[in-house]
Image (cartoon, rainbow, N blue to C red):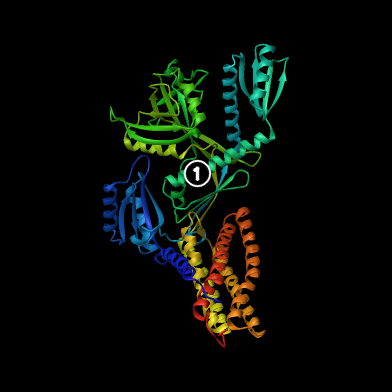
Amino acid sequence: MLNKYPLWKTLMVVFIVAIGALYALPNYYGEDPAVQISGTKGVQADLATLDAVKENLAAAELSYQSAALANGQVLVRFSDYKSQQTANTLLSKNLGDEYSVALNLTPATPDWLASLGGVPMKLGLDLSGGVHFLMEVDMKTAMGRAQESMIGDFRTNLRGENIRYRSVKEAGNGVEVIFRNSDDLAKAESLLKRTYGDYLFVDNEDKLSLKITMTDAKLKETREYALQQNITIIRNRVNELGVSEPLVQRQGAKHIVVELPGIQDTARAKEILGATATLQFHMVDQEHDIRDAINGRVPPGSFLVNDQDGRPQLLKKRIMLRGEHIIGAKSSLDQQTSQPQVNIDLDNKGGSLFSNATKNNIGKPMATMFIESKATGEKNPDGSLKFTQQQEVISVATIQARLGKSFRITGQDSPAAAHNLALLLRAGALIAPIAIVEERTVGPSLGAENVELGMQAILWGFALVLLFMMVYYRAFGLVANLALAANLVLIVGVMSLIPGAALTLPGMAGIVLTVGMAVDANVLIFERIREEIREGKTIQQSIHQGYDSAFSTIFDANITTLIAALILFAVGTGPVKGFAITLSIGIVTSMFTSIIGTRAVVNALWGGKKLDKLPI
């Protein structure tokens, strides 16, 4: 029988719309302004911290919805932004430097809905407020470290083949190796050329030297690696410290964009990003008297650096391991001594390097050095920022055995200090220093205004389309309006389900455009049904032909728009991506609701019946 859907197909439509409505529901409850209190410098928030927070709020007669301790952080919910701001100022002043107090937004979703995975749709920086940073990577340091790595690799290869050399040192933008005789020069050149095909080799037999530089392709690869690794590490740091849905992406050849929606305190946001630091492991120099070094007679292969308490330490210059090779770190207590320790896991290359570096140093002390790079505010001749470094020994431990991919660091003062060190190691060491060259703050009031204006645009557009369809197509117009409402619900539900997807102001424009495109499909179908009726076909034939004939036109138009949206998503950044996401989702959901959804309703109301007239 024409225009009769089987029961399973009708139930499928109802089920999909119901699921969309369920996961769109958390957006009705919205988010609560909140203050998040977490420990810094090795301190963790605990029940005493929670009690102190409650006492401070009670003393100031500041009301709040709830205060709870979870995952080492205290979260206090408020009913309005004014109370949130007042509490932030109060707690920041009274809790001291041991705690970080940050503004945040926390979902107000009921527990039963949250247990089903329901979360509100993420809002972009322009809608929820937050901070935006543009960070510049110090490529000069990145290339310098690449040269250091080349020197270490060449030494290892030459020693492995028993090829003698006088020195391996930096030379301009490359590395120069000096040999004792021409035979060693020839052997080394043959060996290194086989091993390193993406380097350029120039020998000088008169000086018994071999200069090695990177090819253009290798230079580009090294810069790309430094940028991508920094992006990954910054993202890890933000995730470790509990910032929800951050945006971390590259911009150009040496810049990184970081956006933290829901955070309005710029100073605290910088703290969340953490020090732009690296970690290095050095052996402690026990062969020379540290008092001579303090008096100015520092041995050629060593250097002086202070520890956290200001005491000088004499370390060997050779770098045993960099923090970039650490892939995991976890604090714990030693089962025998109950002393705090940090268990560390390395990648394959790091494990091999560390094994070779420690096999002859068992029983000797090793230092973990924390190096923070800061921009001076001045610029180099090429326009890039100048950086200065601050170095500090954060741990000195004795090597108990030959170390490989997994080892432990002891010597921490407290479990909290071990936990803090593990977090730093786990978050990763930056390949090259970075500096904030631009920062922007979007206040919550401006974000709320954007949401209100965007919602007004959507509702006005939706209302005008509903009115037109109802007047022009009568009962069929009501069916189209029902499909439009279901389409909006599905868009919100899908956006809420996709991890990392965020609604931006341009995304709202994409929703408005989707409303127009969705109703356009129904206009094509309804006009085709009218044409079939005017040609004298029966009502049921007209409905059937109207949907079938209009399908190819609707499909072609939507597919071409979807391709354009996907291209925008692939090549665009920030607001462009937000527009592309909502437009892509809207195209898919509108095809479902305007074709399958409306046909299910039309078939249920008028399908398979003998009708003389159709309310269209």
Identify the residue at image location x=60%, y=43%.
254
Q: Pick the residue in front: 324 or 101.
A: 324
Q: Nearer the viewer, residue 461 or 589?
A: 589
- Total labels: the figure holds 1
| Residue 320 showing in the rendered view | no
Q: Judge whether residue 142 can be spotted in this image.
A: yes
**Residue 351 appears at what percent x and percent y?**
48, 28
* Residue at image coords 61%, 53%: 570
Amino acid beneath label 1: Ile
Give residue 80's position: percent from left, percent from top: 38, 64
Q: Is residue 541 above or below residue 557?
A: below
Give the vertical position of 421 relative to 584 (above or below). above
Q: Which residue is mark 1?
A: 234
Residue 218, position as x, y percentages in the image: 65, 34
**Quadrant of the rendered image containing residue 358:** top left
In the image, 490: left or right of 83? right
Q: Residue furthest bottom?
A: 612
